[in-house]
Each structure stands twice: as structure tokens, then as C-alpha cells.
Image (cartoon, grey):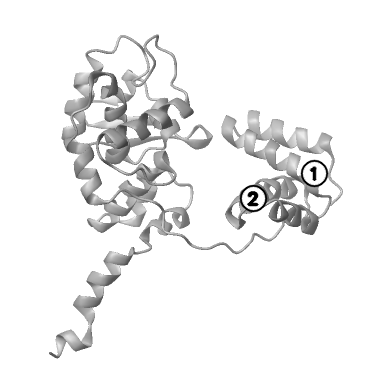
Amino acid sequence: MPVTQEQFERFVQERKYLQNVSHRTIEIYRNSWRHWEKFGPDPVAFVAGMRNRGKSPIGCNIHIRAMNAFFRWCGEKSIPKLKADDKIPPTFALPDIEKLLRFRPEKRQNRTHLLTLLLLDTGLRISEALSLKLCDVDYDNMLLSVRGKGGKNRLVPFSLELRRRLWKQSTRQPYELLFCSRTGNALQHRNVLRSVKNLCVSAGIKPPSRLLHSFRHTFAVNYLRNGGSVFHLQKVLGHSSLEMSRRYANLLTEDLQQMQQRVSLLNRMR
């Protein structure tokens, strides 16, 4: 595909300034372009180069999607995505959630504990939670004003229990951000990940894979299990398409086991 660095830079500038995509998305575009320059200049070489370096089909698809956005902008043909295993997202087991709710953290862990409860109660992305300001919390209507991907804002409801805990935190917070360092600066992702891991260990919980995002998965799965609709889930999570939310509707093993006992012909005719 005859694409140039100059075209790519123009594409990135349009996405950044005209479509207001996130800094993280721009990083993915640039990283994908580096892969294209290294393994291209055709789709087969591009994908084969990534696979030979040990990248999984899911990892390859991230870069394929990014390059396809660029190719569509250029009027070029898209690269077919790789078939990937439809894995069940990592979640917290109910006993672990109970441990986390009942856990009494040390003073230095109070902020991290509140952050984990907020993630479980609202399903926010970690980036969205860390960007929350005190003025984004509507205590009267129990709503969070959230800045999501692509600069899209949405209102996310939260529970009475979380309101009580957030109010207690806000009365002690002299800075603009709801979750920040002792000097009021934004928290770094890697530091938050380390703190949450330590909190889980202190609470007697084995951290699941993709720890920070697993709170979002846990929220979504339990939302559907307890009668929430996929349409409402899409709005709460801030998904751009319904297909993203439908992924959470894949039943886990224990759900299938329970359903089998209810629908089994042998059980009903016993």
C-alpha cells in the first residue's frame, strides 16, 4: 500500500485537532505506524512480522484497527482482522468483592480503597476515574459527570453507599481532583496499579489479570446478571457501539450450570 509518513502525520493531526481523539489513541496510531514501517509495506508482511515476534491475535488486531482507520482515510483497502479467541473477561469473584467491601484499610490505603469501590460501583475506566474533579460529583442526584473517550461526556449514577464514602473523602480533599497525590497532582497509572495490587493482597484477594480493567468487567457482568439491559449498560459504560456491551452478555460457566438445572428435560420429568 503506497502510503507515506507525510500522509500519516496529516491523518494524526486531523484526528487530534478536528476529532479530538484521546492522547492514548494517538499513541496507538503512532505505535502501529512504527510497526508498519518495520514490517510492511504490505498487509501480509505487516501481520506476519507481528506474529513472528510473538504478538497475539488480539494484540495484532489493535494495530490492524489503527492502521485501518488510516487506510480508510487514505482511500486504501482495509486489512482483515485476525480471528481471536472470545475469552471471558477477568472479573472478581463475589467472595472477593465481599472481602473488598468489608476490608478496613490502613490510613495510607484509604484513597486506593475508595477508588476500587468507585470502579466497582460505576464501571468507569481507570482514566475516567482519575480525571474526576470534586465538582463532577452531584451528591443530590447521585451522578458523576464523566469525561470519556474522544472527549464525550456522560452522566453515570452511583449508589447511596458510595455517596456516603465520597462525601467523607471530599470533606478532607483540598485539591481540585477527587483522586490525587498529596500535592494535588494527577496520579500515575503505574503507581495506581501497584497500590491496588497491594490493597488486594492486604485484603486477602488474588488480583485477577488486567487488574484495573477487571473492575469494569466485574461491574458489567453483575449489572447484566442482576437484570440490567445491554442498552442501559452501553450508556453507563460509554461504549460507542452496542456490540462492545454485548460481549459482557457471554454467560460464565456458573451461569450455564444454573441454567442447565432449570431447563434440563431430565430434571423436569424426574
At a point 73% along the width and 37% down the height, the residue shown is 11
Relative placement, left or right, of 251 versus 226 is right
The residue closer to the viewer here, 140 or 174, is 174
Q: Depth-wise, is mark 2 or mark 1 nearer the camera? A: 1
- Say which residue label 2 marks: 65
How many marks can you see?
2
| Amino acid identity at mark 1 | Lys
At a point 84% along the width and 40% down the height, the residue shown is 4
Q: In the rendering, at what x and y percent does residue 196 appear?
A: 36, 32
Q: In the rendering, at what x and y percent does residue 182 appear?
A: 36, 11
Judged from this view, the residue extending furthest toward the right is: 2
Report how far apart the C-alphas of labels 2 and 1 lie in the structure.
17 Å
Does residue 191 show up?
yes
- Say which residue label 1 marks: 38
Q: In the rendering, at what x and y percent does residue 73 appear?
A: 73, 45
Judged from this view, the residue extending furthest toward the bottom is: 269
* Callout 2 secondary element: helix
Does residue 140 show up?
no
Judged from this view, the residue extending furthest toward the left is: 270
Crowding around mark 2 (Cα neighbors within 10 Å: few <14, some 14 to 19, many 20+) is some
Quadrant of the frame with the C terminus: bottom left
At a point 32% along the width and 19% down the height, the residue shown is 135
Relative placement, left or right, of 66 versus 119 is right
Relative placement, left or right, of 213 versus 95 is right
Crowding around mark 1 (Cα neighbors within 10 Å: few <14, some 14 to 19, many 20+) is few
* Callout 1 secondary element: helix
Q: In the rendering, at what x and y percent does residue 200 appear?
A: 31, 36
- Note whether 98 is above or below 21 in the view shown: below
The quadrant where residue 236 appears: top left
| Amino acid identity at mark 2 | Arg
